[in-house]
Image: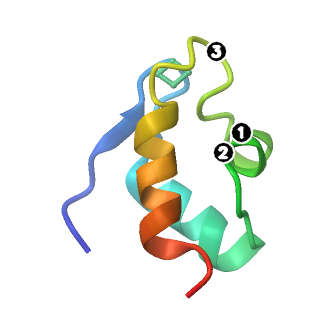
Amino acid sequence: MSERRIICNCNEVYNDEIIKAIQEKGCKTVEDIGEETGAGTICGGCVDDIQEILDEYAGK
Ligand code: FES
């Protein structure tokens, strides 16, 4: 895994929290991640980055 970096500035959500939400909570969509972590629920500017992490980690 790459370094810890912030994905969602609005809610201060880091990539490792999103990965954890995918792996431990079974999040499969940007909406799931939003419910679990709050990421992507304010300005929406980080949605593409969240999707990228989902593509990489979900469904494997
Ligand atoms: S940066 Fe994630 S909602 Fe604004």
Give the amino acid type for the residue marked by disc 2 in the picture. Val
Q: Quadrant of residue 49?
A: top left
- Residue position for label 3: 42
| Residue nearer the viewer, 43 or 51 | 51
The relative height of residue 24 versus residue 29 in the rendered view (above or below) is below
Count of marks overlaid on the render: 3
Residues at marks 2 and 3, CA–CA distance in whole angstroms: 13 Å
Other-residue count near label 1 (Cα within 10 Å), few / some / many at <14 / 14–19 / ≥20:
some
**Residue 32, position as x, y percentages in the image:** 77, 50
**Cβ atoms at labels 1 and 2 below 8 Å apart:** yes
Give the amino acid type for the residue marked by disc 1 in the picture. Gly
Q: Which mark is residue 34?
A: 1
Q: Residue at x 58, y 73 (%)?
A: 58
Q: Is mark 1 within 8 Å of ligand 1?
A: no
Q: Is mark 3 within 8 Å of ligand 1?
A: yes
Q: Earlier in the sequence, mark 2 or mark 3?
A: 2
